[in-house]
Image (cartoon, grey):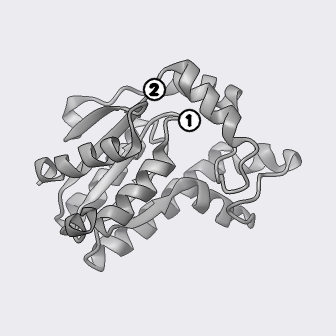
Amino acid sequence: SKFAERAVDPMLIVLAGVSGTGKSTVGATLAARIGAAYVSSDVVRKFLAGIPAREHVPAERTAEVYSTEMSARTYEELRTRTAAHLAAGRPVVLDATHSRAADRTAALQLARDAQVPALIAELRITDDEALARIADRASDPLATSDATAEVYARQTETFEPIATSEGVHLALDASQDLDDLVDEIADSLSAAG
């Protein structure tokens, strides 16, 4: 039973990867499996913009909601929420693109400040698979992401590769079965300590 695997010690799992790789699905599933708090950039960004999480951003607000300034506010709020969970002694799954090394470094600093282990789980997938997922979720009423093929293309061009100096890093094939992918991350948590 997967229930027996729950309740890990406080730690930080930083999910990274471009849109369409399945970060939200993997993150929520992993958080439920190990008893962690789940902190999502899609949900936080929409909260800050006053938009319900399951509602798509109106076209006339896209530039505002996905601006550099709003991204900075979103990552700052993600870190605030993550720090609060870590301070309360909870493990955290932090779900965001984390395309910039500076954002990953700031997230990992939270773990160092809380004196808990951390790892980066980077999800990778082929362009065709990611674009198919993005197209499929455009009509999904439960989706929180507003990413489009254009957003994906921009992210693939600007994603800063994760360096070994950043810490424990799993580079995972996100096309595999969800349970297998979550198992692979869960099985690697001891490596972060």
Instruction: Check contact, mark 2 vs mark 1: CB within 8 A.
Output: yes
- Regarding residue 133, the answer to whether it shows in the image is yes
Q: Is residue 102 left or right of residue 71?
A: left
110 or 191: nearer the eye?
A: 191
80 or 36: nearer the eye?
A: 36
* Quadrant of the drawing holding the N terminus: bottom left
Q: Secondary structure at mark 2?
A: loop
Q: Residues within 10 Å of mark 1 (few under 14, many from 20)?
A: many
Lower position in the chain sequence, tag 2 or tag 1: 1
Q: CA distance from mark 2 to mark 1?
A: 8 Å
**Residue at image location 37% in from the left, 62% down from the top:** 31
Label annotation for residue 150: none
> Picture coordinates of residue 91 (x, y %)?
28, 67
Image: 154 above or below 24: above
**Residue at image location 41% in from the left, 57% down from the top:** 29
Q: Secondary structure at mark 1?
A: loop
* Quadrant of the drawing holding the C terminus: bottom left
112 or 120: nearer the eye?
A: 120
Which residue is the site of mark 1?
20
Question: Which amino acid type corresponds to the residue marked 2 in the rendered image?
Answer: Ile
> Picture coordinates of residue 26 (x, y %)?
42, 49
> Picture coordinates of residue 21 (x, y %)?
49, 35
Question: Which amino acid type corresponds to the residue marked 1 in the rendered image?
Answer: Gly
Which residue is the site of mark 2?
125
> Picture coordinates of residue 125 (x, y %)?
45, 26
Q: Is residue 104 left or right of residue 3?
A: right
